[in-house]
Amino acid sequence: MTPAEQVVDESLGMFPRPTWFKGTPLNFAENLLFPSPEIENPDTTIAIIEASEAGVQHRVSWTELRNRVSQFAAALRAAGVSKGDRVGGKVRAHASLTLGVLANTAHSVIGFLAVSSIGALWSCTSPDFGTTSILDRLSQIEPKVLLADNAVFYNGKEHDALAKIVVVAEGIKSLQKVVVFPNVKTHTMDISAIPNAYSPPKIMLTLVLHLKSSSPSPNRISSLPPSNSITPSSSSTPQEQLAYQNL
């Protein structure tokens, strides 16, 4: 890592925001995936424990996490996502943005880290939100990719998310790809009702966005200035005031 020329100019006030760690490129995902000191025995040491009301569902080692993030990032690049793009997820709990409408799962974390490693922007919302609330938050940031779960499991019941995704996919005109994950294995994965509302391949539907390689190459992590935004966050007000969170 290149040493910073200056941490911050202390003579400046808080607004306008001063430059931090001038001359030092960073990446948020890289610092999470490769912490210091290095993880001992990454093949067996657990990085993520995915649990639900049914109990522990999945454990992900550091090696598996790094590999899956690398694969997902490569697939996003192949899909046209680049530094500055927006990617979004529907998740429980300006450049390319990815959006998520996802449950609190390992693939949600992996999606976020993959997007961040590229230098694209990530935003997410809970799948228990109504379609109006989702569109209020996500449509104004013009995402390129939407990640979503087929359903969530809550209070002993399956709750479908696909019907919402149909409306959301129609309402966000900037979307180029919609990726649906089989979060609830017993729930339908019939995504035929999600419309390809624009000229092909404006919206492409796949079960999982991934590479088929069993030996993923190291992730090409983008070096970014500390002032680079990683996620736009919205308030709970009807007007949805946005703030961009930095590295």
Image (cartoon, rainbow, N blue to C red):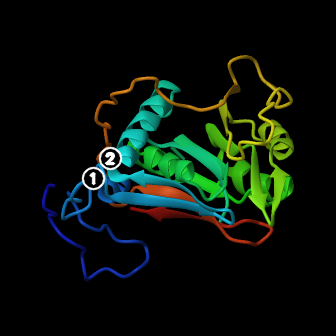
Residue 55 placement (x, y as % from top left): 62, 64
Query: Pointer 1: what residue?
Result: 42
State yes or no: discs 2 and 1 in contact (Cβ < 8 Å): yes
Is any atom of residue 225 visible in this view? no
**Dot 2: element:** helix
Q: Amino acid at mark 1?
A: Pro
Q: Quarter-wise, where is residue 38 in the image?
A: bottom left
Q: Is residue 114 left or right of residue 126?
A: left
Q: Position of residue 18 (x, y in %)?
A: 34, 71
Quarter residue 153 falls in: bottom right
Q: Please state which amino acid type lies under the numbered disc 2.
A: Thr
Residue 163 visible in image: yes
Q: Left or right of 195: which side holds 87?
A: left
Q: Is residue 71 left or right of residue 40?
A: right
**SS assignment at label 1:** loop
Of the two numbered discs 2 and 1 on the same chain, state the one appearing first in sequence: 1
Q: Nearer the viewer, residue 38 or 177?
A: 38
Q: Position of residue 213 (x, y in %)?
A: 40, 23
Q: Residue at x 68, y 58 (%)?
A: 125
The 10 Å Cα crowd at callout 2, few under 14, some 14 to 19, many 20 or more, is some
| Residue ID at (51%, 43%) | 95
Quarter holding the N terminus is bottom left
Q: Residue at x 46, y 26 (%)?
A: 211
User: Measured along the vertical axis of the image, is residue 70 above or below residue 88?
Assistant: above
- Measured in 3D between alpha carbons, the distance from the residue under mark 2 to the one under mark 1, in whole angstroms, is 5 Å
Q: Residue furthest top?
A: 200
Residue at label 2?
Answer: 63
Name which residue lies at 42% across and 40% down: 68
Closer to us: 45 or 39: 45
Decide: is 199 above or below 135.
above
